[in-house]
């Protein structure tokens, strides 16, 4: 049976998972009458809610007697740890580009990794039937992107298909028959080479572990492509670390392969196929699983280092333990270490006191997804403001720089450029038209400058702007960057908020809470209209008298409070503030709940 291994890469919301759905349907994966789930590859709840792919997943389809293993890769750079590992398992990539938007930052990030590995791309211009589609412009931008990323002549000579994933067709010509996906299937078989590993079937067994997961029945399981040889259930293998150190010897208890959407048990794993092995106890990602006579590990793809860190601590507020069941630091530590073991892009370090843990990762979205998963599991946490990780080279302090690609209406370009290049220390790289009445701005901005900027950006562009960011490079430290300008309104009492008190406080700033909400001393209930913090009493009720007069009995009409998402809250807080996360609530509070300590800290910050 002919075998092909291909990864599909695309920017967030360019239609990648929808395209895979159509490939599954048209290849006969689903039996007649079977209920078909939309976005079948997005199996995670958060993936479905947010419409993004977080975990790399594989599937396989059969086409004209052959089998095609398809890998659906994450579309966001924060989950790049998944991307780097998964690309080492495939022999070609299908680059999916929105015909209206063209290649975007996450496309550039993943494509650079694929081209560096020597993979030859297939370009699919998706959504060409949309009114705003400009396939010719998008194709020229893809070619320019490949050239800028150092693609060789073979990679620049890429085939192109025009498609509509949601309508289930792909054609070699823009005005083709628009019937089905057969043109894409045939192109994959013709353009993507068969795995070179098939020729090494007679050599000793070797496999590089690229993804790690856990199964409640099988325990630790590792997925990767078989580089050489054959493995059968019951055989004894050993695991070698990246440096060649022998980690363990184990017996293969199960071999699983991707057959459609199912993970099916097979008896033999052959060179070139993507399989999952069970039975090991210590082996992890980037380790080599091999026959006992092999002593040299396979080369592993290096993974970009984390760029931000966040401190996870126990929830020590007066409302702690009311919503969640997992509140102890020991339980939080075990969960974080388990996450770091499964996700190599995350690192966990203990703090000296042992009550909190520094978690380092690739971006705010990755941290937000981890925290959201933990709160759904019943954890209560306190989260600090993200801090950028600096490094030193040759006596010079370097900081991470991100490439921000922004699409805005023409009338808002001035405000956006002023914010990025002024207080946030960014550098304007490119500015060009991006359709009728739209401008695309590309700027290199320190990661510190983009923390907390997204909400301000949406305000400046009246909600019409689109901001995408991706790690660009390390650069010399650009000096201090001003944080949030406004102060906050802090509760000075414990109890339940009163509508009359909040109504009177509205002139002081915008509120984060509504009436009849549980609050405590030191909790942040709103944003002050000035730069200083202000302690207020949201429990103060109206004094009652038996005198009736015109104008004194006005109805209380509260402005709806600002409800922040988890990522917005984490980006909003200052260095002396925390986000209190529980399964039911997201609250902001001062790091120091004691009023005297809070005032001393505020004075020190002003000085």
Image (cartoon, rainbow, N blue to C red):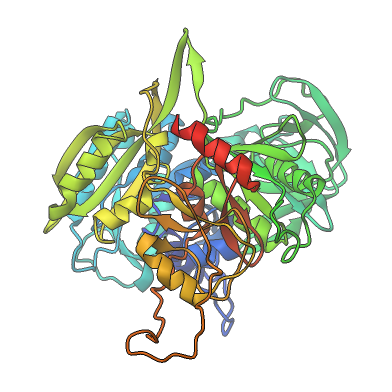
Quadrant holding the C terminus: top left
Question: Can I make out residue 393 in this image?
Answer: yes
**Which of the 4 quarters of the picture holds residue 448?**
top left
**Residue 535 percent location from the top left of the image:** 51, 54
Number of labels in the image equals 0
In the image, residue 129 above or below residue 80: below
Which one is nearer the viewer's eye here, 130 or 200?
130
**Residue 356 percent location from the top left of the image:** 71, 40
Which one is nearer the viewer's eye here, 414 or 372?
414
Q: Residue at x 57, y 76 (%)?
A: 516
Q: Quick check: 213 left or right of 330?
A: left
Q: Residue furthest top?
A: 394
In the image, residue 203 above or below residue 378: above
**Which of the 4 quarters of the picture holds residue 99?**
bottom left
Q: Residue at x 54, y 47 (%)?
A: 366
In the image, residue 138 above or below residue 479: below
Q: Quick check: 306 left or right of 218?
A: left
Q: Residue at x 69, y 54 (%)?
A: 317
In the image, residue 290 above or below residue 462: above
Q: Quick check: 407 left or right of 51?
A: left
**Residue 528 percent location from the top left of the image:** 40, 54
Which one is nearer the viewer's eye here, 494 or 460?
494
**Residue 163 percent location from the top left of the image:** 31, 63
Question: Can I make out residue 272 in this image?
Answer: no
Which one is nearer the viewer's eye here, 119 or 348?
348
């Amino acid at each position: 049976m002919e075998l092909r291994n291909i990864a599909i890469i695309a920017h967030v919301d360019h239609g990648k998972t929808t395209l895979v759905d159509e490939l599954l349907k048209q290849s006969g994966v689903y039996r007649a009458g079977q209920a078909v789930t939309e976005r079948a590859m997005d199996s995670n709840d958060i993936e479905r809610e947010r419409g993004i792919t977080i975990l790399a997943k594989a599937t396989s389809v059969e086409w004209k007697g052959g089998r095609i293993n398809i890998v659906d890769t994450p579309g966001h750079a924060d989950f790049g740890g998944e991307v780097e590992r998964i690309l080492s398992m495939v022999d070609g990539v299908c680059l999916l580009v929105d015909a209206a938007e063209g290649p975007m930052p996450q496309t550039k990030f993943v494509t650079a990794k694929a081209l560096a590995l020597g993979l030859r791309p297939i370009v699919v211009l998706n959504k060409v039937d949309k009114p705003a589609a400009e396939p010719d412009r998008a194709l020229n931008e893809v070619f320019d992107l490949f050239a800028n990323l150092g693609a060789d002549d073979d990679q620049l000579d890429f085939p192109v298909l025009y498609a509509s994933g949601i309508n289930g067709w792909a054609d070699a010509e823009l005005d083709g028959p628009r019937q089905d996906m057969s043109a894409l299937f045939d192109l994959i078989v013709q353009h993507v080479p068969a795995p070179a590993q098939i020729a090494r079937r007679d050599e000793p067994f070797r496999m590089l572990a690229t993804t790690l997961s856990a199964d409640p029945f099988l325990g630790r399981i590792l997925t990767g492509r078989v580089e050489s040889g054959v493995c059968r259930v019951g055989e004894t293998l050993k695991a070698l670390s990246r440096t060649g150190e022998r980690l363990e010897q184990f017996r293969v208890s199960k071999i699983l392969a991707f057959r459609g959407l199912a993970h099916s048990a097979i008896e033999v794993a052959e060179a070139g196929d993507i399989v999952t092995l069970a039975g090991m106890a210590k082996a992890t990602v980037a380790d080599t699983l091999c026959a006992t006579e092999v002593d040299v590990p396979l080369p592993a793809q290096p993974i970009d280092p984390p760029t931000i860190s966040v401190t996870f601590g126990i929830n020590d507020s007066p409302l702690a333990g009311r919503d969640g069941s997992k509140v102890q630091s020991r339980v939080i530590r075990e969960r974080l270490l388990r996450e770091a073991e499964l996700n190599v892009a995350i690192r966990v370090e203990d703090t000296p006191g042992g009550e909190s843990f520094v978690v380092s990762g690739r971006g705010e979205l990755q941290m937000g997804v981890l925290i959201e998963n933990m709160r759904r599991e019943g954890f209560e946490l306190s989260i600090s403001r993200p801090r950028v990780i600096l490094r030193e080279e040759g006596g010079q302090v370097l900081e991470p720089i991100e490439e921000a690609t922004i699409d805005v209406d023409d009338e808002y370009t001035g405000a956006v450029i002023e914010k990025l290049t002024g207080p946030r220390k960014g550098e304007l790289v490119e500015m060009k038209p991006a359709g009728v009445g739209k401008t695309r701005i590309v700027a290199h901005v320190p990661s510190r400058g983009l923390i907390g900027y997204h909400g301000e950006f949406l305000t400046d562009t009246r909600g019409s702007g689109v901001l995408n960011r991706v790690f660009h490079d390390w650069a010399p430290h650009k000096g201090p960057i001003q944080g949030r300008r406004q102060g906050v309104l802090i509760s000075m009492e414990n109890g339940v908020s009163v509508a009359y008190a909040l109504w009177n406080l509205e002139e002081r700033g915008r509120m984060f809470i509504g009436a009849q909400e549980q609050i405590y001393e030191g909790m942040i209930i709103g944003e002050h209209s000035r730069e200083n913090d202000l302690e207020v009493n949201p429990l103060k009720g109206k004094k009652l008298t038996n005198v009736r007069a015109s104008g004194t009995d006005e109805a209380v009409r509260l402005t709806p409070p600002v409800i922040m998402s988890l990522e917005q809250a984490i980006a909003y807080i200052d260095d002396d503030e925390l986000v209190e996360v529980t399964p039911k609530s997201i609250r902001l509070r001062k790091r120091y709940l004691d009023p005297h300590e809070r005032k001393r800290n505020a004075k020190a910050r002003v000085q």
